[in-house]
Image: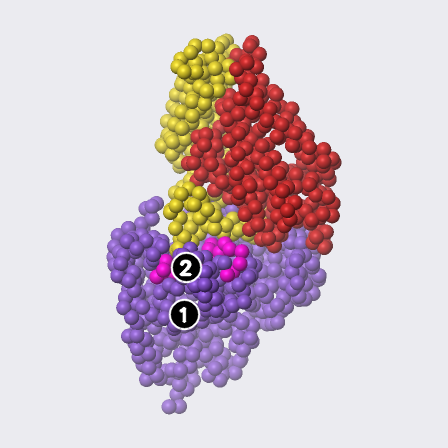
Chain colours: A yellow, B purple, C red
Amino acid sequence: MDPFLYLDRDTFVHRLDPRTKMFLLVGAFVLAFLFLNPLYGLVVLAAVLAFGALARSLSNLGRIRFILVAIALVTTALWCIFASGETPLFLFVELEALLYGIGVALRISTTIIAGMIFLSTTRNEEITTGLVKLGIPYRFAFAVSTALRLVPAVATTGATIGQAQRSRGLDLDEGGVLERVRKRVPLLIPVFVSTIRSTNIFSMALESKGFGASPTRSYFLHLEMTRRDAIVLVVVALLLAVALYLRFAGYGGLEGVTR
Amino acid sequence: MVFRLFFGCGEGDDIAEPAISIRGLAYRYRGQEKPALDGVDLDVAEGEFVVVMGPSGAGKSTLCTTLNGLVPHFFRGRIDGEVEIRGRSTRDGKVGEFAREVGLVFQDFEAQLFSTNVALEVAFGPENFSVERGEMKRRVEGVLGRVRLEGFEGRQPATLSGGQKQRLAIASVLAIEPRILCLDEPTTDLDPVGKLGVFEIASELKERDDVTLIVVEHETEETLEADRIVILREGRVVTDRPAREVLRDVELLQESRIMPLGVARFFHEMGLWQGQLPLTPAEGLREFRQRGWQIDAGRHRELVAEDAEREEGYGEALIEVEGLSHRYPNGVVALEGVDLAVRRGEFLAVLGQNGSGKTTLVKHFNGLLEPTEGSVRVEGKTTTEQGIRTLGQTVGYVFQNPDHQIFSDTVSDEVAFGPKIRGLEEAEVEERVKEALAAVGLTGYEEEDPFGLTKGERQRVAVASVLAVRPEVLILDEPTTGLDYAEQRSMMDLVRRLNESGSTIIVVTHTMWVVAEYAHRAAVVRDGRVVLSGVVREVFAEEERLRDASLRPPHIVSLGNALGHTVLSVDEMLRVAGKGER
Amino acid sequence: MKEIFTMWRHTQMVVLVALTAAIYAATLIPTQFLPIIPGFTNIRPANVFPFVFGLLFGPAGAWGSAIGNLINDFFGTLGPGSIGGFIGNFFLGFLPYKMWGAFFRRGEDMEPNLSSGKKVVVFIAITVLASAVCAVWIAWLNDFLGLLPFAALASVITLNNLLAGVVLGPILLLVLYPRVKRWGLLWTEIMVPDEVPAAGAAFLGNVLVWAGGIGGLIVGLVLGLGFYDQGLAAAGFATGAAGLALGLIMIPFLALIVIGSLMLGGREQVEAAEEDAGHSRVR
């Protein structure tokens, strides 16, 4: 199974510069956080979903649907308990608290979906190159991209080791949760040990290819802001400005709730 | 020359100055008693091709890492003596600076690929040296061409075959355009044809671009192209002579725990003096004919008869594979329509190139994989109905990488894991551990930390831990990879003893001499199908068809084939060859 | 704290960041399906890694934990809350090695194994503290952003960390320590003394971090659970104002944690490792 969300499709969103997409992501976060009123929240969510459809990335929703539904229910329930308002609804729950809970649930769902669209349309190396271009130190970006690349490798090693131990008689699927976790411990140790063991050879190979040889570095991947990027940036900036104006003009808030 | 590999070579260079000059080099790793290198002197001239050989632990890899300054800069440890690269001491600069001069490709090619696609991988080195983008593009293109990976630019390195990965590792170093290239056991994990590919590239580099080549290798058949062979033992240079001279010195190689060339050894045993020894099958054939020697057809028939007799001694079919197909969840068809039977007492080798499906096939035998179509029966019952836990009693599986199954703090705990988890009593477990450790020759290692052992010893621990369950069938996946000649021999002698004491053995491998000398039967897998199977002698007679499957029999077998009679080892050749007096 | 920047000079440390992050993420991801507060936190046995990797790999373990947690977010729940997760997990890996040195005198055996009773006690104490600090950071940010109430998140994260660390930590440390040492991968062996600050006021730093972490957790829980009814928030604020108040009250505690960390050293540990090795490196 490919654990990554990236979808190799050819859409205009995919073709955007990763820096533009990062700006879009932050923009979506800001929009989601501006409005607590569930009605406004729904509009933001709808906009993000529409954008996702444009990027042909909504198929990944299936993979996170469980988390999304759970988040929506839990956040709403929690805020019903922890927040209070003025209009009693049932038991100790007030209308404002319920609305607040729904608003927050929408807020979180929206940001997670925006994050999903970003990851569905941007390759790992684009993210890291984009980060470097935005001023993040190269070595940090290198560590992030290497870690991203190694996650499936570690998982694969884990699967191989699982096979090895199962063929020695370890039955992983028997017993309760604790029992199963305990059985997985011997299985995991070789994964950690063999992964950590490769540190030295990995580091030597890096230095042998000139890692850190010179203070500056050139990049093979070329990032370029095109007109397309400029248009998108302007549109998003305008959208944000309008939203900010609306919010400060008093729209989209939620009155009468305290936490 | 359309593609110029190096800058600044040519005019004004001091011809007399060696590319590499090592004087009195000694090195001890931190916390180690024994020095890894102990007084090495070595000069390598510009454009030379030097092969370094020697048993495990001789200091070969350490020597490689001294060439670009990883020793002493990367590791803490004690260094004496001097390494000069084109006149400059490695003490005087960073690893990065020497990386430009000396390209180092490590044995473990998995651990040296960092990027998400092939082009980026090759560009990684030049990026570090701030090579300008246009130039970088040109280099990526050129270098991928020379390692024959054109058209792979966008592929993920993880999806390449072993041979392709190794060629990519070489390409990624070549892109830095070093004048010296050092390859540490570049072919260990490759099938015979993959090995050839790597050496072809190496020879081309030397011919066309005058690259100085240092290659660590343990298989003699791959070293014929070298100018010189240097043999290391216990951190010292014991031999440093022209390659063909060393290869003819059969006794020296044997003393140094290096497998001599089959053809050379045969003629040596036949009494030829050193200077006359032919090295390759072609040279051997000429010599054999010139001397008017004959193969004694009668004796050869005896060999064939012995094979047949052994065949009859097997018991009933233990594993029966019928119409087996396997499709991975991603849709890749790994096996298609495989039929095969393994009888009690057999010693079967499953052969095939990297990625042919041979490991997928044997993983069906103990239920690690289930057939997509067809069936696999073990002792009459299908693997699906038995399940992996029950099957584990009958079929033991030793994985390729011992580090993937070892997790205990001591050797005896490791070996006891299988019996314990099957609920055996303490006394019984102890008995089994003792027996299994004795079988693999590790008695006395009970309290050792498995992670502190050598690769060969860890491999034995892995075998012991499977033996302790006392399975009927023992499957070993590439049991000789990463071991030196002596370790390979002792590993396979162990396997042979187990077979003789009643275990049915299945070995997955592409080390051809191991198959020739140890296995009884062979099944050749190619693109998910068994294309050839039978008694090893019959299979190895089909050189053409083996080559189609990227396999190549050992030299001595080729010589026999050329003479019209398949022999499987030098000893067999000696048995059937006559000097023609009779 | 300069070692968290100087460590990037060492290729091995960079690689350790990547490897620990990969291991952490790869073991976190499968447990995403064992939620406690769905979308925010789940049963996380993998939380043992920051403690152990932090102790063994020092700043590389801290960065690795932060990045590993971020990558885990990449597989489903990337959002503004990820920033809190990044910082919280950073401290989860940062405090173990940083606090460790503050409990041992110069010349005392301070190798990060569990070879004495004192070391076991120190390990557990540090696990408690780091768990709380991590929880305070994450819960503070989430509350501040109005995503989840402080009390619910902080208590769950603290317990979750603590359980993984105390139950699995010693096992993992016992397995990994001898091997990591053999391969020369302890952070004290890779880094050199100049790159690590000497302890300015280790004792005071130690006290401040405790005050910030445990104090912050307790005050946050009390506020979150007890006082929200009383309308602690100034009435004039719009929604989320109460959260803002809690957010502001927590800031001094967070500051204590950072200031305390600045006073802690680390160089002693590196020097001890160097003396232990007998001879210095050729560099």
Residue drawn at (54%, 72%) of the image: B257
Q: Position of residue B465 (x, y in %)?
A: 45, 61
Crowding around mark 1 (Cα neighbors within 10 Å: few <14, some 14 to 19, many 20+) is some
Badge 2 sits on which subunit? B
Label 2, label 1: how far apart the Cα atoms are:
23 Å
Amino acid type at circle 2 is Leu
Residue drawn at (35%, 67%) of the image: B504
Which residue lies under the disc numbered 2?
B424
Crowding around mark 2 (Cα neighbors within 10 Å: few <14, some 14 to 19, many 20+) is some
Residue drawn at (72%, 55%) of the image: C278
Q: Which mark is residue B498?
A: 1
Between A126 and B189, the one nearer to me in the picture: B189
Labels 2 & 1 near each other (Cβ < 8 A): no
| Foreground tag (2 vs 1) | 2
- 2 or 1: tag closer to the N-terminus: 2
The part of the chain drawn in magenta is B392-412
